[in-house]
């Protein structure tokens, strides 16, 4: 008996899928179809899959071509399956030509002609209008956002705004952006949603103006320097039925959520301490090193370091202290934060002029989680115990620099497919702004 295997997501099942399965079945006597989990798809950078896995499996089953359906949930599984199921032929559509040649070592590899002019991506994009996104600011983050947005279907960067017109024009030209204008209202009118990547002190004003126009906002952190202003933005978003998201990218990465969930699963016992460190020696001429009012280590990194602390211990800390080492201009090159909770404590260390080990360590009564740098792009972590020979390793796939997960979430929220707000809640974002406010009053003399 000749056994054939093929894999796919089979989202919004279409004619191309049907034809592929039909041909695959004709290649042999027994067809196994691997259907990917949403988690696996996200890990390999396929965002915004619409149908739940059971629907996708059911659609494959209904074709009658599959003799067996299995679930694909991890990298490297194809070789395991080929060996376990004793497969003769591996096949996929011609869009993958060459990509699976390495499987020739295990079985025959056949690329089947792809049905032209149809794909799940096309259907997804037709079902929902493509969101026009405008970018405010054309500095360091904006090019990264453009690169990453290419991996997210349903959104398109169509406009750029920067009061420094030269920079905006150069950016427009380089990335072929349609709209570039000095008129802010015109800019907002031309888009459905805005990504704010301008200097820290401008986030609040821009976010407010965009929300007032009823458009959605994804803003780099921090949203604002006070709790009151942060709350005002969330209230405004609510009133205007617009989405407001703070861009702490780590929060939206599936691998980071998994780390937190495993830490809280009881494996390391009761959690008593979290230590999160994020340092980068920034260029002496950069805004982070020269802007003594709105630069510095805290404003650069506190969003990241507070995230695991709040996710693990919650929002009700009893006390927080902040201590900084500043340069001659009063800019914090290094800041340490200490949180006290009823049954635990946490430390955050941040540096733009001091280098340290960028670990995340979550300590419990039975063991600890150790995520090495760059834990904010969670790629791997260990669970370790008293018995040093017992170590559980977790390796995950984290695509790009994380912006794509954040943008995918933003698009899903705008399209209402992602209703639950657990990745970074408004409440979490507001409580982080409490700490930002404390820092600004204490270290920057903000009134
Ligand atoms: N396929 C095909 N013809 C199409 C679309 C897909 O033959 N027009 C094949 C793919 O090559 C693959 C299988 O169908 O072998 C499952 O593909 P999947 O990635 O689920 O479908 P796509 O429509 O390509 O999805 P997306 O747009 O999300 O990439």
Image (cartoon, grey):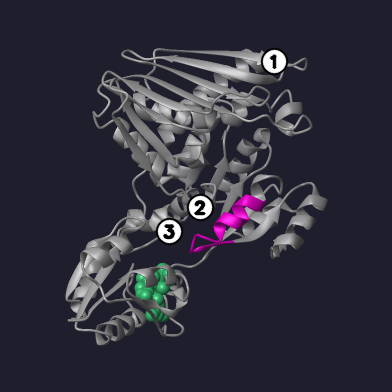
Q: Can residue 424 be seen in this snapshot?
A: no
The residue to which callout 3 is attached is 47
Which quadrant would residue 52 be assigned to in this image? bottom left
Q: CA distance from mark 1 to mark 2?
A: 34 Å
Queried whether the magenta region covers residue 147, the answer comes back as: yes
Within 10 Å of the Cα at label 2, are there few (<14), some (14-19), or many (20+) other Cα atoms? many
Return the residue nearer the eye: 135 or 11.
11
Q: Can residue 13 be seen in this snapshot?
A: yes
Label 3 CB, ligand 1: below 8 Å? no
Query: Going from the N terminus, do you reach mark 3 or mark 1 first?
Result: 3
Exactly how many numbered labels are in the figure?
3
The residue to which callout 2 is attached is 404
Contact between marks 1 and 2 (CB within 8 A): the answer is no
Q: Is residue 264 above or below residue 167?
A: above
Contact between marks 2 and 3 (CB within 8 A): the answer is yes
- Percent position of residue 184, x then y: 70, 51
- Percent position of residue 447, x then y: 65, 16
């Amino acid at each position: 008996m000749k056994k054939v295997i093929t894999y796919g997501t089979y989202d919004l099942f279409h004619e191309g899928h049907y034809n592929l399965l039909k041909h695959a079945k004709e290649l042999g006597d027994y067809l196994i179809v691997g259907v990917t989990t949403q988690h696996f798809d996200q890990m390999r950078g396929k965002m915004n899959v619409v149908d739940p896995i059971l629907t996708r499996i059911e659609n494959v089953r209904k074709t009658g071509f599959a003799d067996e359906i299995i679930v694909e949930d991890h990298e490297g599984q194809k070789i395991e399956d080929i060996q376990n199921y004793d497969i003769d032929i591996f096949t996929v559509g011609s869009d993958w030509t060459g990509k699976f040649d390495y499987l020739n070592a295990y079985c025959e590899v056949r690329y089947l002609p792809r049905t032209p002019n149809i794909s799940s991506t096309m259907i997804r994009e037709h079902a929902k209008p493509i969101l026009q996104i405008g970018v405010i600011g054309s500095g360091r983050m904006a090019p990264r956002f453009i690169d990453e947005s290419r991996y997210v279907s349903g959104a398109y960067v169509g406009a750029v705004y920067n009061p420094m017109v030269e920079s905006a024009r150069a950016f427009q030209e380089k990335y072929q952006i349609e709209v570039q204008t000095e008129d802010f209202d015109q800019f907002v009118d031309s888009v459905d949603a805005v990504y704010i990547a301008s200097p820290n002190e401008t986030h609040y004003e821009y976010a407010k103006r965009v929300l007032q126009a009823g458009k959605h906002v994804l803003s780099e952190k921090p949203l604002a320097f006070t709790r009151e202003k942060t709350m005002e933005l969330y209230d405004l978003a609510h009133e205007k039925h617009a989405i407001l998201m703070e861009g702490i990218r780590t929060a939206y990465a599936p691998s980071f959520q998994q780390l937190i969930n495993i830490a809280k699963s009881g494996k390391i016992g009761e959690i008593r301490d979290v230590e999160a460190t994020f340092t980068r020696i920034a260029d002496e001429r950069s805004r982070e090193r020269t802007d003594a009012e709105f630069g510095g280590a805290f404003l650069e990194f506190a969003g990241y370091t507070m995230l695991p602390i709040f996710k693990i211990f919650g929002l009700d800390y009893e006390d927080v202290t902040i201590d900084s080492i500043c340069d001659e201009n009063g800019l914090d090159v290094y800041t340490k934060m200490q949180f006290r909770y009823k049954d635990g404590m946490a430390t955050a260390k941040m540096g733009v002029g001091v280098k340290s080990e960028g670990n995340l360590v979550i300590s419990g009564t039975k063991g600890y989680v150790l995520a090495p740098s760059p834990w904010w792009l969670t790629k791997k972590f260990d669970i370790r115990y008293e018995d040093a020979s017992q170590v559980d390793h977790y390796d995950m796939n984290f695509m790009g620099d994380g912006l794509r997960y954040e943008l995918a979430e933003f698009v899903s929220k705008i399209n209402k497919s992602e209703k639950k707000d657990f990745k970074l809640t408004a409440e979490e974002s507001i409580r982080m702004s409490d700490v930002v406010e404390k820092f600004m009053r204490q270290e920057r003399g903000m009134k």
